Image (tube, grey):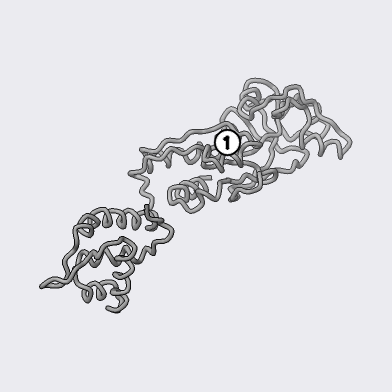
Amino acid sequence: MVNLRSIDLNLLVTLDVLLDEQNVTRAAQRLHFSQPAVSVHLAKLRELLGDPLLLPGPRGMRPTVRAEALREPLRDALAALSKAVAPADPFDPARADHTWRIAATDYTESTVILPMLPDLRAVAPHTRLALIEMTPALMAKQAEQGDIDLAFHTTDGSPDGLRRRKLFTERYVLVARRDHPKLRRRPTLKQFCALEHVMVSQSGGFQAGTDEVLAGLGHARRVVLSVPHFLVARAAIATSDLVAMAPERLVRDDPALQIVAAPVEVPGFEISMLWHERVHRDPAHQWLRERIANAV
């Protein structure tokens, strides 16, 4: 078996043209080589393949049986190689049938995925989208292995080794159901702390950034409900007298809720889109990332 690592690819290109032209001079012109250079290539090919390949004839050169047998396989192999190293075709969303897998929390599903979904369905109707539950500890590995294509996470705490693009900065607002009896106007700090609060915590905790700010002012609020998901918190607020310090984008368009000026300022957070280097230059992924960035 021939050791492919020892073969100069240029020799195979020269052989393909020689078999087509059956003339060293015309082959040299097509290859933009000198005639002696093509003759040197032919000599190397004869040594490599153990066959004269092309013999002198009355109208140029005649291929040997071995050369004839090589003609079609060689042309197919060179065509396949040319296709393999050619630049990627532009992404055509109207014809694409990609399946994208995106890791997201319920918050980013609502604030990132839902706003871009109508556009995605209209422009790329044959594609599919799978939303995967966010597992921060596994995100980098999932992206590396191709289990997910994109992820959304707060910029702070994002795993190393992934490319990142900031999407937006979020702020916390005080939210309650419409016509909440105790929130007809902006509450004082004392009134704010006396309200019954719901908060989001994956671990079931009852303290977050709001409580740290209040502690610094010598106050504490009443957190009576801790839930793992923002959407559960939003539903609880809409159907009770519970209130929450919630991300503004999650609640600002909900007709069942009202946003009230809070007596404290709670630091917000930044949401970024994350992906692995392996898909960074892929036209389909570039297109999807731009669509998402433009929709939020």
* 213 over 6 or under it: above or below: above
Q: Which residue is drawn at 42% across and 41% down?
A: 120
Does residue 27 appear in this view?
yes
Task: Identify the image quadrant of residue 156.
Answer: top right
User: In the rendering, at what x and y percent does residue 6 appear?
Assistant: 42, 61
Please indicate whether residue 261 sits to the left or right of residue 20 in the image: right
Picture coordinates of residue 26, whole percent (x, y) = 21, 74
Local secondary structure at mark 1: strand
Quadrant position of residue 253: top right
Which residue is identified by label 1? 104
Give the left or right position of residue 206, taking residue 55 as reference.
right
Q: Which of 148 and 8 is in front in this view?
A: 8
Q: In this view, does 82 lie above or below 292?
A: below
- Give coordinates of residue 42: x percent, y percent: 29, 69
Q: Nearer the viewer, residue 168 or 103?
A: 103
In the depicted view, which residue is nearer to us: 81 or 255? 81
Q: Give x and y (percent) for residue 270.
A: 65, 46
Kindly identify the amino acid type of the residue bearing the numbered disc 1.
Ala
